[in-house]
Image (cartoon, rainbow, N blue to C red):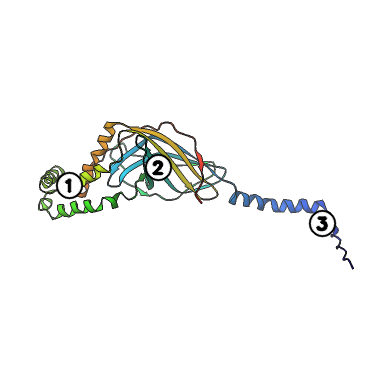
Amino acid sequence: MQQQPLPSPSWLADPKLWIALAALVQPWVIALYKRFVLRGRLRVYEVGNIEIGFSSFGPTIGILGSLNASQRDVFVKGAEIVVVREKDQAQAGFRWFVQRPFTWKTEGVHTEVQPASAIAVKKDSSVNFSTLFTLPGFAEEHAAVAGAFTTAWNESELSKADTQDTAARLVLLSKFSEVSPTPAKLWEQMLGTFFWQPGDYTMTLSVLAEKPTPAFTKRWRFRLSADDTNLLKGNITMIVRTLAGIEADFKFAYPQYDGAKADEPRKKKA
């Protein structure tokens, strides 16, 4: 005997019911869409010039600007820069290291910094940033030769002289360099791996955002002159002075941003 289907309740055919249900469910659907599906849009607006440096952190890049979010709030969890030296395609990957004050003094230099950390950018608003990017692994690469110099210097009678005058300490360090090979070895090793050569570079900034917002990239080109390179190489001597506990004055190059390309979503690797 064939079973007859049960009749549908008459209230299911009432259009007012479905309209009411749609009105009830719609806010939840919109909320879920905004939270899990809608992608934010992040734009990077650079300000001033690029800061290219070389210090105890190794090669460094400093950038100044603002982050602007649209479509939804964006949670920035990291940033990295890849630099390609165009003449030989040598590549270096920099990671954000510290955030610095967005303002500066007319006299003296700001030294207050804080570790780079996540940034929340509200929808349709901007957040200023001044970030220093460093090359991971530099300290480990030069740890052995730097440690040999520091040990030899600290054990030297010259380092124990009773004076804190910078000029006098530099004379003592110069005399130490005449009797110990460690300063020259440190200088030669850092010079041999020195990244900032004269020529053109391509710089790609990638800003990493929390899902569902994809990572964004922006690319520029910049150029370093021979004078820029020589200025930065002089910082190797400043590193030696720092390791010897002597006041140092690091120099920077400030090339212009050139050939900026619009922000583009960057697909994350699976």
Mark 2 or 3, nearer chain start = 3
Of circles 2 and 3, the one toward us is: 2
Give residue 251's position: percent from left, percent from top. Answer: 27, 38
Res. 12 mark? 3
List the single residue furthest toward the right. 1
Which secondary structure, mark 3?
helix
Residue annotated with mark 2: 82
Q: Secondary structure at mark 2?
A: strand
How packed is label 3: few (under 14 Cα within 10 Å), some, or many (20 or more)?
A: few
Give the number of callouts: 3
Q: Position of residue 248 (x, y in %)?
A: 22, 43
Q: CA distance from mark 2 to mark 3?
A: 60 Å
Q: Quadrant of residue 17?
A: bottom right
Q: Disc 3 marks which amino acid?
A: Leu
Q: Nearer the viewer, residue 17 or 242?
A: 242
Q: Callout 1: few (<14), some (14-19), or many (20+) C-alpha neighbours within 10 Å?
A: many
Front residue of 50/200: it is 200
Give above or below for 186 relative to 48. Answer: below
Quarter of the figure with the N terminus? bottom right
The furthest residue to the bottom = 1
Q: Marks 1/2: CA distance?
A: 31 Å
- What kind of residue is marked 1? Pro
The tag earlier along the polypeptide, 1 or 2, is: 2
Q: Tell me residue 141's x, y (percent).
A: 28, 51
Rate crowding at label 2 as few (under 14), some (14 to 19) or many (20 or more) other CA atoms within 10 Å.
some
| Residue 44 at x, y percent in the picture | 47, 39
Label 1, on which residue?
Answer: 183
Estimate the spatial distance between the alpha carbons at disc 1 and disc 3, rounded to whole Å.
88 Å
**CB-based contact (under 8 Å), mark 1 and mark 3:** no
Q: Report which quarter residue 102 is drawn in.
A: top left
Tag 1's secondary structure? helix
